[in-house]
Image (cartoon, coloured by chain):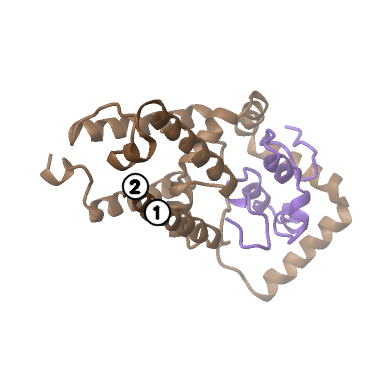
Chain colours: A purple, B brown
Amino acid sequence: MADGSRCSHIEGCELYPRFSLRGALRIWQDRYCNHPTHHQKCERFVRSNAGQPVPATLLPNGEHIAT
Amino acid sequence: MPDWLLHDYWPWWFSAAFFATMVVGVWLAERRLLGVSGSYAAAIERTREEDEAARRLDEADPAAIDDALMRATLAAFGPEAVAELEREQAAAAAAAPAGPPIGLTGPRQAMPRSAHVTFLVMLAVGGLLGALGSSGWEVRTDLGPLHEALTGGGAISLLALVGGGFLVGFGTRMAGGCTSGHGLSGCSRLQPASLVATASFFGTAVAVSFALEAVAR
């Protein structure tokens, strides 16, 4: 359900809402989710499209949130 | 129970109100979009790794997640880029004080696999109850006289149904949703992709129905 300019997986992404909680975290949205082309480099996007598991802690750059 | 609920098909106005209530209710209660194929995929595809990651995130202290996210953000982009973004945001906020943010704004817990399974089982139970309460329930291996006429019945008819089900599943995954996800949730939000997908579903169904009827005659 994309508008053609940002990531089509935003609606179901478990991390996207968390990136809205704090101003500095929105850099992920700017650099990945809402970027017209870079969202295709998001590791979550890539894995999802490849039918691979997408852990909730996986960040767009392939790192994990160390909880 | 009222008579109109015991017919083969519910009246259109009742179905419309019912489905609208369900879609809006799920959104208001859970902030999630209703979608059968998405639940099905989550129920059968979700791995132990995903379950474990979701559990860790759900059970962690929100402040700890916030700190961990900030550390990861600084490591990924560097303190200068983050500081620059914060300056831009502060300047934008000062120039035009914003109202509440639009869209998804709160953290959302991952729905456990058991919730997806329960949803899918209840779909079948609801269908069974509806059938028992109206025209009755019976196991069939055909889709009616037209289907019988085209397939000849028997094993071929059953294979056609299984093959059709496979194609529906394949198309649903390719399209990123089914009639509930695109037709109910997507169209109600005027999502362009869902409007196109739903028009394709129903347009194809109408065209194929006419074509099959013409072939069967």
Q: Nearer the viewer, residue A26 or B141?
A: B141
Q: Residue at x 70, y 59 (%)?
A: A34
The answer to which of marks 2 and 1 sits earlier in the sequence is: 1
On screen, residue B135 above or below A38: above
| B120 vs B205, nearest the viewer | B205
Is residue B217 toward the left or the right of residue B116 in the image?
left
Callout 1 secondary element: helix
- Where does the image place residue B211, in percent across and percent down from the top left? 40, 54
Instruction: Tell us which disc is closer to us: 2 or 1.
Output: 2
The residue type indicated by label 2 comes to Ala
- Look at 31% across and 50% down and name the residue there: B217
Residue B112 appears anywhere in the view: no
- From the viewer's perspective, tell me whether residue B107 is left or right of residue B142: right
Chain letter of disc 2?
B
Q: Are marks 2 and 1 in contact (CB under 8 Å)?
A: no
Quarter of the image with the N terminus of chain B is top left
Front residue of this view, candidates B156 and B170:
B156
Task: Return the residue at label 2.
Answer: B216
Q: Residue furthest front?
A: B217
Label ID, residue B211 = 1
Few, some or many residues within 10 Å of mark 1 (<14, 14–19, 20+): few
Q: At 46% across and 40% down in the image, what residue appears?
A: B36
The x and y percentages for residue B187 are 45, 58
Disc 1 residue type (three-letter): Ala
- Tell me which chain the residue with mark 1 is part of: B
Say the numbered circle drawn on residue B157: none
Q: Residues within 10 Å of mark 2 (few under 14, many from 20)?
A: some
Q: From the top left corner, tell me how far across and down residue A43 is, in percent.
A: 76, 43
> In the displayed structure, would residue B96 be above or below residue B127?
below
Task: Determine whether the residue tagged by mark 2 lies in a helix, strand or loop.
Answer: helix
